[in-house]
Amino acid sequence: MLFPFTFNPTIRSLVKPCACILLFLLFSCTCFTSTEAYDPLDPNGNITIKWDIMSWTPDGYVAVVTMNNFQKYRHISAPGWSLGWTWAKKEVIWSMVGGQTTEQGDCSRFKGNIPHCCRKDPTVVDLLPGTPYNQQIANCCKGGVLSSWAQDQSKAVSAFQISVGSAGTTNKTVKLPQSFTLKAPGPGYTCGPAKIVEPTEFIQPDKRRVTQALMTWNVTCTYSQFLAQRAPTCCVSLSSFYNDTVVPCSTCACGCQGNSSLTGDCVNPDSPHLASVVSKSGPGKSSITPLVRCTRHMCPIRVHWHVKLNYKEYWRVKVTVTNFNYRMNYSDWNLVIQHPNFSNLTQLFSFNYQAITPYGSINDTAMLWGVKFYNDFLMQAGTLGNVQMPPPDAYPWLPNAGSRQEVSLLVLIMTSLVALVFQAYA
């Protein structure tokens, strides 16, 4: 198993020194009091599922189902999405390309050709990378993993083809599926009803001809952190170069030891049985409940904000993210931070950056993510991890007793912290 893997990006901003104290980090790991699927940092974000009927068959139709992740920073992580619905009549799935149902169901009423799935409420998952080409279509076979829209739009789409039988064979006789559900991979998404829209148009490869689907309907799914998990999933600690004190994550920030219903189980890293416990529930296992290192804060993820320099002309901070979850690797992670002076950013090191402007022209929200093949992969907690830099406890290196009052002011001014989205790719 692996040590908490840390990455340490650095931010430089041309602002007055006091701006590094007025730090407003708004975290999606904070608690919500409503089940409404609304994200103030991405108010229009959603996952849109589009059904395009491409041809009619003697007893139904062939459709291409496309899933677009229009969320700016929220991924769909491994083990990937699963899409479910309920048929309006007695439809069956004769065959699929680029996806498969998790269960076949009872097909005993059929003789000869047996459908791919006869369940009233099928659940479809993506195929894995490396699937034979004759079982693929465009944008399939990613293991259900989708990027966020801001990071890589080309990887924010997934698709599969489905042949439906015992269904309508015209636009007037087709009945739309009902009660859509989306897990990615756990709960959190709420899907609305299917709505018929204008048929999708397709530009042919020669760009000289446009065709269109015979019929199209859309389903929109939105995310609620409260529905996904009641307990926060991360916490923030603070330090500065001018003081030898680290302001740690608050006690029970994500739950308390012994309350596994909220935070999951915890493991002491010094336990002689650590290897056996982790091997039974390591990365790639079906459980998405965290198995975290036993800490005061009990959070799967800790984000540390360290003020490195503070000059009249500019200030510089270093951000470190540590994974305490033995069950989860995080790749293509991203970190969303709100700060009133992000409009004055001048230099960024060791990560990618994109401004997110949920409030129109106000540029106070930044999305950060790792550099490919350098620090885009955050390993699970354990004993063989790659630690790139010293832990946050080692950051303050210029003790100054006269600055302790400034740190106290920082603690008083701090409010809830950082919008953090980690996506686990096995």
Image (cartoon, rainbow, N blue to C red):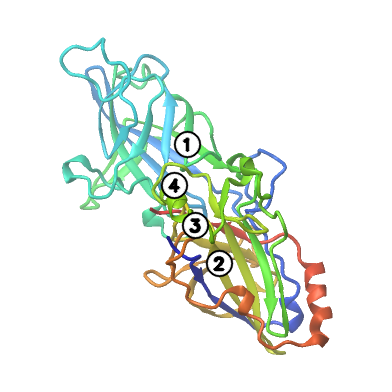
Which numbered disc flags the more N-terminal residue, 1 or 3? Answer: 1
Q: Estimate the spatial distance between the alpha carbons at disc 2 and disc 4, rounded to whole Å.
A: 22 Å
Could you tell me which residue is drawn at 72 percent across and 90 percent down?
Answer: 312
The residue tagged with tag 1: helix, strand or loop?
Answer: strand
Q: Residues within 10 Å of mark 3 (few under 14, many from 20)?
A: few
Query: Is residue 404 shown left or right of residue 143?
Result: right
The residue tagged with tag 2: helix, strand or loop?
Answer: strand
Residue 148 visible to the viewer: no
Q: Nearer the viewer, mark 1 or mark 4?
A: 4
Q: Estimate the spatial distance between the alpha carbons at disc 1 and disc 3, rounded to whole Å.
A: 40 Å
Q: Residues within 10 Å of mark 1 (few under 14, many from 20)?
A: many
Could you tell me which residue is drawn at 52 percent across and 55 percent down?
Answer: 325
Q: Amino acid at mark 2?
A: Val
Which numbered disc flags the more N-terminal residue, 2 or 3? Answer: 3
Question: Disc 4 marks which residue?
Answer: 281
Vertical arrangement, residue 234 with respect to residue 13, above or below: above
The disc label shown at residue 321, or none:
2
Question: Disc 3 marks which residue?
Answer: 272
Q: Amino acid at mark 1?
A: Leu
Question: Disc 1 marks which residue?
Answer: 182
Percent coordinates x, y for residue 75 in the rendering: 47, 52
Q: Amino acid at mark 3?
A: Pro
Q: Amino acid at mark 4?
A: Ser
In-front residue for pair 266/270: 270
Q: Are marks 1 and 3 in contact (CB under 8 Å)?
A: no
